[in-house]
Image (cartoon, rainbow, N blue to C red):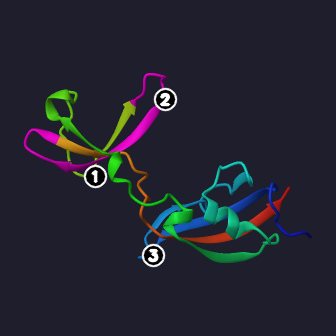
């Protein structure tokens, strides 16, 4: 049995947690993820954590925000007039929104604040600004 190295394709089970212990995602109730390292599919800290693991090995990896989704970027907060929102939306803090770009792609946004005549939307990744912890189990190196 070998160890994981860069550019390997692996199958891995994971549980992602915040430093409070709150689980934000897990593959344990579904198939393990299959990913080829070095292609940008995983955050850098998670990829680094998989290097040198052997099949059936488990470990916990602490990923600082710089190797996860980065720091919260203030320039990704924007004010939107309530009158520019669809009439059927009652904005609430934490509510998710989708914005369509001219090229057809979509951006996930979150309402950060609701004011009298406008809302503040946040285009940062929901896990930006947070250190993450991953419990990993390497299932297979392919």
Q: Quadrant of the C terminus?
A: bottom right
Residue 135 place in picture, x, y as percent: 61, 72
Q: Determine which of the numbered discs, if any, sits on residue 79 in the image.
A: none
* Residue occupying image coordinates x 78% and y 57%: 10
Magenta stretch: give its range. Answer: 100-118
Q: For residue 90, what is the image quadrant? A: top left
Distance from disc 2 to disc 3, alpha carbons, whole Å, reads: 32 Å
* Label 1 or label 2, whichever comes before in sequence order: 1
Residue corresponding to mark 3: 19
Q: Nearer the N terminus, badge 1 or badge 3?
A: 3
Residue located 68% across and 70% down the image = 49
Q: Left or right of 71: which side holds 64?
A: right
Is residue 27 shown left or right of residue 1?
left
Disc 2 target residue: 105
Marks 1/3: CA–CA distance: 20 Å
Q: Nearer the viewer, mark 1 or mark 2?
A: 2
- Check disc 3: other Cα within 10 Å, few if <14, some if 14-19, many if 20+: few
Q: Which residue is at a point 41% across and 63% down the rendered structure image?
A: 129
Q: Is residue 49 above or below residue 104?
A: below
Q: Residue at x 45, y 33 (%)?
A: 106
* Mark identifier at residue 94: 1
Q: Nearer the viewer, residue 120 or 35?
A: 120
Is the C-beta separation of discs 2 and 3 under 8 Å? no
Neighbor class of circle 1 (other Cα within 10 Å; few <14, some 14-19, many 20+) is some
Task: Name, please, the residue furthest toward the left.
Answer: 116
Q: Are marks 1 and 3 in contact (CB under 8 Å)?
A: no
Determine if residue 87 is in view.
Answer: no
Residue 31 in the image, given as x and y percentages of width and height: 67, 55
Looking at the picture, tell me which residue is in the foreground, 68 or 34: 68
Q: Quadrant of the N terminus?
A: bottom right
């Amino acid at each position: 049995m070998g160890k994981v190295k860069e550019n390997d394709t692996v199958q891995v089970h994971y549980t992602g947690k915040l430093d409070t212990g709150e689980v934000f995602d897990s593959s344990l109730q579904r198939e393990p993820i299959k990913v080829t390292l070095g292609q940008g599919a995983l955050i850098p800290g998670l990829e680094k954590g998989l290097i040198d693991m052997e099949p059936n090995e488990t470990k916990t990896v602490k990923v600082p925000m710089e190797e996860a989704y980065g720091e919260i970027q203030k320039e990704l907060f924007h004010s939107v007039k309530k009158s520019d929102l669809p009439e059927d939306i009652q904005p609430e803090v934490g509510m998710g929104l989708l914005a369509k770009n001219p090229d057809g792609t979509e951006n996930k946004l979150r309402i950060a604040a609701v004011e009298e005549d406008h809302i503040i939307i946040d285009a940062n990744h929901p896990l930006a600004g947070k250190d993450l912890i991953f419990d990993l189990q390497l299932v297979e190196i392919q």
